[in-house]
Amino acid sequence: MAPPDAAFRLDCHVHTRHSKDARGSVLDLAVAAQAAGLGGFCLTDHDTVAGHAHIREAQEKTGLLIVPAIEVTSAEGHILALGVREDVPRGLGYLETREHVEDQGGVAVPAHPLRSFSGMGPRALHHHTDEGQILAVEAVNARERRLVQQNTRKLVSELGVSPLGGSDAHWVHDVGAAYTVLDDAPGSVDDVLDAIRRGACRAEGTPLRRLSVLGHTASLWAGPLRRRFIDRQEARRP
């Protein structure tokens, strides 16, 4: 159901089947985003721009604004590379990752910063922010528990950078659980990036149901196990 007001909502963290751990096409996500009352979303598949080829079709069929992006696996945590159209090398430090992103005219945004193993963490966030190297941070990620969301909001507020919201949807039905509200409706990808740079945005959203998060985790284990079982059965055939 669409929200009652006319605020422009942008889910800044969405995955499709082009991420190995996600389901759904770009068009599937766009249709779901439209039904959720979003004005658009950022297509942030893991370390690939493969889904970008389907952006135009999804935009034409839904009228949504879709920002080309990637979730980059950096040496300092996952980084949302918003506005990029080419792959960004994985495994680099934050500053090198940021340089690749900005060379494409994009904005580098640390994702789910308090998440174990894949978040940048408070110490590095403070360091890079103090050096003027971070403009925005994902303040609300729908896959995080409520307490983690509260702590992340507090941290981002202390940093004084632009707060973004994203569902981190890996299943179609999760899109729009968290989002970024822009002060003015953007007419282009450049307008979105400009609003983020200026801080003309805020993060909103609530945690996904744990059943959805746990179900996604279980599916990641089930796929390889099923493949292994099938391979063993085939190997035993005469």
Image (cartoon, helix red, strand yellow):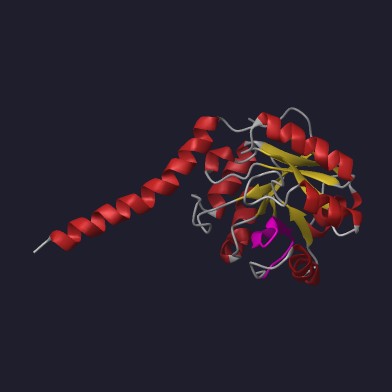
Which quarter of the figure has residue 109? bottom right
Q: Residue at x 72, y 47 (%)?
A: 113
Q: Residue at x 86, y 39 (%)?
A: 157
Q: Residue at x 69, y 40 (%)?
A: 38
Which quadrant, please, contains the N terminus?
top right
Q: Nearer the viewer, residue 104 or 143?
A: 143
Q: Position of residue 42 (x, y in %)?
A: 68, 52
Q: Position of residue 94 (x, y in %)?
A: 75, 63
Q: Is residue 103 magenta?
A: no
Q: Nearer the viewer, residue 211 or 194?
A: 211
Quick check: 210 above or below 65? above
Q: Nearer the viewer, residue 35 or 19?
A: 19
Q: Is residue 104 left or right of residue 221?
A: right
Residue 200 can be seen, yes or no: no
Q: Position of residue 98 (x, y in %)?
A: 78, 65
* Residue farthest along the front direction in this orientation: 123
Q: Is residue 81 magenta?
A: yes
The secondary structure that most of the magenta stretch takes on is strand
Looking at the image, how many numbered discs can be counted on the residues?
0
Q: Give the residues in magenta.
A: 67-86
Which quarter of the figure has residue 105? bottom right
Q: Nearer the viewer, residue 220 or 30?
A: 220
Quick check: 119 above or below 216? below
